[in-house]
Every structure is written in C-alpha cells, then in structure tokens.
C-alpha cells in the first residue's frame, strides 16, 4: 500500500476531527438571517468577547469577512493603505475595488517587518482633489511574509499613528491565533488595537468553513447588511458555527505543535540556502532564486514522492504545517524534500 500524501500546501486542507463532526451533527440550529440560530449567536458572542469587542458576525469565508470589514471603515472612493503582499490586495481578486469602490495604495512588501514611519508618511489627509486615507490594514500573521508575527510594539505605534490622523486600523487576522500562541499576546490585547478584525476558523484551527468580522455593535449591525448584499446570509448555519466553537475550545493551544513541526522542516531545509526567512509559526517560505530548480519543478518532484508543496510564484514556494500532518508526515517530508533539493 502506498504511503499517504503529506499535504503541506495549506492549513486550509484539514478535515474535521471526529469530535468536531459530532459537534456539527448535534448542533442546535435556527435561521441565522433572522438572527435565530443559537449556535451562530453563541459563536459570535464568544469571539467578540475573546477580542474585547462588542460584537462579531459569522461569514462563510475569510475574503468576505475582510471585505465586509474594509467597507465598514473605508467609504467608496476613499483610500486603504496596506502592504503590496497583503492578502486583501493579492488574493481577493480586486474585491475592495469591485465591491467597495475602495482605492488602495501599498507600501513595499516587507512582511511582518513593517516600519510605522513609512506608513505614517503615506497617510493623505482630506483635501482638495486628494484621495483621503481612511484605513490601514495589516496582516497577522503575514502569509506571504512567511508567517511572520508583527511585533506588539509596531502595532501599538500604528494605532497611535492612526488615532492621531483619524485613520482606522483593520487586522486581517486569518492566523492571529498563531501569533497569539507564538508570542503569548492575549487576544484581547490585539483586539484593543483595531477598529475591525477578521479572524478565520478554517486556517490552522481546522474548521471546514468560516470567519468572523469583529468590531463595535454599530459596525456589526452595518456588517450584517453588507454580508446580505454580498450573498453571505446563511440559514441553519449553526452546523458550521458548531465546528468553529469546537475549534476554539480544542485547537488553539495545539498550534504550538504545528509551529514546532514547521521549525523541524526549516532546520532540515536551511542548509540548502532556500529558506526565505526565519520561521516563527506554521509557514515555511522557500526562495528558490538561486536554486537549480524552480518552484514548479520542486513541487512536481515532491508530488511524485507523495509530498504536496504550494507554489506561490516562479521561484517561490511554501510549506504549511497543520493538524492533519503528524510527526511521521514531517519525517517523510524532510526525507523527500532534502533529497529533491540535494539531487536536482
């Protein structure tokens, strides 16, 4: 019998655990468009409390949650600042412009190592013929920045800069749980810094579906209207919310194990000179600019031996650890990847 695939493409590929499936099967449900699904309501209240905000809204995807949040803080025609590798302008297919009429301007991609002074210099106040800056978006952890964690001091300085300029601060917190586990920063401390957050249940935490928008009660009331406009109103969504509640109860602390697995991969690959940056969480970024094989060739060679790798660009690849890859899977990945990098 062939060895099972070791899927390191993303932490979105996980399957619900038996306990999560049981929670989904027994969930109490109602019609969420009417606000009557008790499991959804409980999830929203729980997540809002975790981040110290008044309210939260369950959405089917992280992209929708981000775009709802951006529409809450940037009126049509006004400006969002973010980095050039941010998920909101890289992987959401122009949704900020298409749905929100939002103008975006970016600073050079530096991952989690952003300089608040650079961001401050970009802010444009309202004035004659100028597009005013209304919000700054950051990503915690940073996907294309190799899972880097933005330091708390940097976020506090961005909060000060935004507050002084009357500019909102949004967090794309798809993997904020990983930052919380890696640095020990309480979720409520992160929450206090942002006007809006989006937090994902299906990356790392292992739920099959779902993200939440987090903010004030007034903002979330508006978010509910925007979600409906975007086609995100769901009915008996408690079946999905139950998976999220199970994940919050059982899968946050275990992220430390994924970080340790990523560190093992990084240590094994480091001698080949393709590790793009220090590994802090569950993402291992590969820079193949000086390697003999490009990203597609690496992925094809690894796939032929049962290891799946994500291709992010011609010479950029990524490995992602998660709950469905155990220690034996990491051992297999190390064996295959080191051989491929050595022999090709």
Image (tube, rainbow, N blue to C red):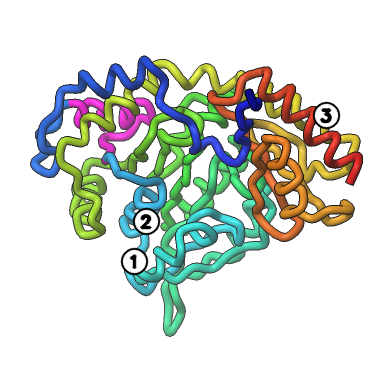
The numbered mark, 1 or 2, whose residue comes first in the sequence reads: 2
* Foreground: disc 3 or disc 2: 3
Q: Give the image location of residue 299, x and y in percent.
A: 71, 47
Q: Give the image location of residue 43, x and y in percent.
A: 27, 28
Q: Give the image location of residue 14, x and y in percent.
A: 48, 31
* Residue placed under numbered mark 1 in the picture: 100
Q: How far apart are marks 3 and 2 (CA)?
A: 38 Å
> Is 15 on the left-hand or right-hand side of 122?
left
Q: Dot 2: what SS?
A: helix
Marks 3 and 2: CB-CB under 8 Å? no
The numbered mark, 3 or 1, whose residue comes first in the sequence reads: 1
Q: Dot 3: what SS?
A: helix
Q: Which residue is drawn at 34% across and 66% down?
A: 100
Q: Is 127 drawn above or below residue 206 in the view shown? A: below
* Closest to the observer, 52 or 269: 269
Marks 1 and 2: CB-CB under 8 Å? yes
How crowded pointer 3 is (Cα within 10 Å; few <14, some 14-19, many 20+) is rated as: some
Which numbered tag is attached to residue 67?
Answer: 2
Q: What stretch is highlighted in magenta?
A: 39-57
Q: How far apart are marks 1 and 2 (CA)?
A: 8 Å
* Residue 86 in sight in this render: yes
Q: Is 75 drawn above or below residue 174 in the view shown? A: below
Q: Which residue is drawn at 54% across and 68% down?
A: 105
* Closest to the observer, 145 or 231: 231
Q: In which quarter of the image is residue 17?
A: top left
Q: Quadrant of residue 44?
A: top left
* Residue placed under numbered mark 3 in the picture: 268
Marks 3 and 1: CB-CB under 8 Å? no
Q: Is 226 drawn above or below residue 283 in the view shown? A: below
């Amino acid at each position: 019998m062939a060895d099972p695939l070791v899927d390191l493409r993303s932490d979105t590929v996980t399957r619900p655990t038996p306990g999560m499936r049981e929670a989904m099967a027994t969930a109490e449900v109602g019609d969420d468009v009417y606000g009557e699904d008790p499991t959804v309501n409980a999830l929203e209240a729980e997540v809002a409390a975790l981040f110290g905000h008044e309210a939260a809204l369950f959405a089917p995807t992280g992209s929708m949650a981000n775009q709802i949040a951006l529409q809450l803080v940037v009126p049509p025609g006004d400006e969002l600042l973010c980095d050039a590798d941010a998920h909101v302008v890289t992987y959401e297919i122009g949704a900020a412009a298409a749905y929100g009429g939002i103008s975006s301007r970016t600073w050079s991609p530096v991952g989690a190592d952003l300089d608040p002074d650079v961001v401050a210099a970009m802010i444009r106040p309202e004035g004659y013929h100028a597009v005013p800056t209304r919000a700054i978006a950051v990503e915690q952890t940073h996907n294309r920045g190799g899972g880097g964690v933005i330091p708390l001091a940097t976020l506090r300085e961005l909060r000060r800069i935004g507050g002084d300029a009357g500019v909102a601060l949004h967090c794309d917190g798809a993997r904020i749980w990983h930052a919380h586990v890696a640095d020990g920063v309480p979720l409520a401390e992160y929450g206090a810094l942002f006007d809006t957050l989006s937090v994902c249940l299906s990356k790392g935490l292992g739920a099959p579906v779902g993200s939440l928008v987090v903010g004030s009660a007034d903002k979330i009331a508006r978010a509910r209207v925007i979600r409906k406009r975007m086609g995100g109103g769901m009915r008996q969504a408690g079946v999905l919310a139950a998976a999220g509640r199970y994940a919050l109860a059982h899968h946050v602390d275990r992220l430390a194990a994924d970080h340790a697995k990523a560190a093992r991969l990084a240590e094994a690959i480091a001698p080949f000179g393709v590790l793009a940056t220090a590994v802090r969480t569950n993402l291992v970024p590969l820079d193949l600019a000086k390697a003999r094989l490009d990203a597609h060739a690496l992925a094809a060679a690894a796939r032929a031996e049962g290891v799946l790798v994500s291709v992010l660009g011609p010479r950029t690849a990524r490995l992602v650890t998660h709950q469905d890859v155990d220690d034996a899977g990491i051992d297999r990945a190390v064996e295959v990847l080191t051989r491929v990098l050595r022999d090709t």
